[in-house]
Image (cartoon, grey):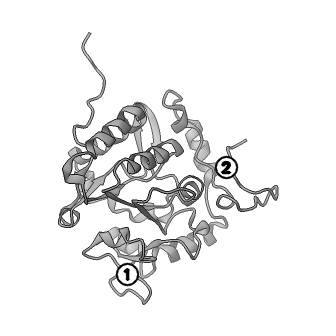
Amino acid sequence: MPDTSPTRPKTLLRKGNRRLAAINVYTWSIPALSARIDGVVIRTCPAAGICARACYALNGTYLFPDVRRAHEANLRYAVTDPAGWEHAMITELTAPRFRDAAVRVHDAGDFFSDDYTLAWMRIMRTAPTTRFYSYTKEVARFGALVEPDPPANFVWRYSYGGREDHLIRDSDRVADVFPDDEIPNGWRSQRGNDLVAADDNTARVAIPANNIPAARRAQGDRTFSQWQAEDDAARGRTHCTSRVDHALHRQPRNGPRSLIQPASPHVAGRTGDPDPETGELTTERRTPS
């Protein structure tokens, strides 16, 4: 019987766009927001908020069929054969080209599950001469799984515009999208050099908005953090987990169990913060009752 299993990507990490390639940055990308893999919808950006209305990864070259297929193949590999994917990633990172190079984890997509996040932490530790960095909106997940013991060669920053913005602390490394290049004092623009985001000593990174007409009209003259705060206030709540959970309950239940369970719960605070319902300290992510 012929082998009908999906073809595995031959190369997992690729030079990014022209701007990233010029500064020796490799990227790992999966589909933005969500993708259907073998009949199961996987939310690849669980904490996305207003950013979904102005996402660069839903425009331009990201919509090219070859690009979409490549990103879906990456996601399929990671969720259907996580051990094989992790081994392949570790093996690829031993190549000489990654010595002293930088890897941006998620040019599109985010750390969508606990298991996937922990796998990346293990991968990073096997490549100490490679610098890894990420923008993420998974504030609660990172607070529980990454912050207590991060790899020494990994810099992450919480990117405003997500449904967990309210969990970001003043001491966190952050990024915000600005409507233009008029960046206020105290912020460092990444225009022309995305490796600014990989600098552990840079607290606040400013990202000038991409030149996507519809996205710029939606954003207006506000930053993503301001836009998200306005959206939260208009909704009267900081997230919409129950609505997303309901949608996921209707999905086929024939995929990896850890990925098709209801949406990752939004904890009231980060690990160690009191739960307002019980008064107990939050030590793990709650599952829906």
| Residue 29 locus on image (x, y percent) | 32, 50
Front-lying residue, 37 or 189 = 189
Number of residues whose C-alpha sits closer than 10 Å to that of mark 1, classed few (under 14), some (14–19) or many (20 or more): some
Residue 46, compared with residue 255, is above or below; it is below
Number of residues whose C-alpha sits closer than 10 Å to that of mark 2, classed few (under 14), some (14–19) or many (20 or more): some
- Residue visible at 53% across and 35% down? 251
Q: Earlier in the sequence, mark 2 or mark 1?
A: 1
Q: What amino acid type should be assigned to the residue bearing mark 1?
A: Arg
- Quadrant where the N terminus sits is top left
Front-lying residue, 82 or 241 = 82
Q: Is residue 267 left or right of residue 161?
A: right
Q: Secondary structure at mark 1?
A: strand
Q: What amino acid type should be assigned to the residue bearing mark 2?
A: Glu
- Residue visible at 61% across and 43% down? 246
- Residue visible at 37% across and 72% down? 199
Image quarter of residue 153: bottom left
Q: Which mark is residue 188?
A: 1
Distance from Cα at disc 2 to Cα at disc 1: 34 Å
| Residue 148 locus on image (x, y percent) | 57, 57
Q: Is residue 228 left or right of residue 126?
A: right
Task: Name the residue that disc number 2 marks.
Answer: 284
- Quadrant where the C terminus sits is top right
Q: Which mark is residue 111?
A: none
The reply to whether residue 213 is visible in this rendering is no
- Residue visible at 59% across and 72% down? 169
| Residue 279 locus on image (x, y percent) | 82, 59
Front-lying residue, 53 or 177 = 177
| Residue 46 locus on image (x, y percent) | 51, 52
Residue 85, compared with residue 275, is above or below; it is above
- Point out the residue furthest to the right here: 278
Image quarter of residue 132: bottom left
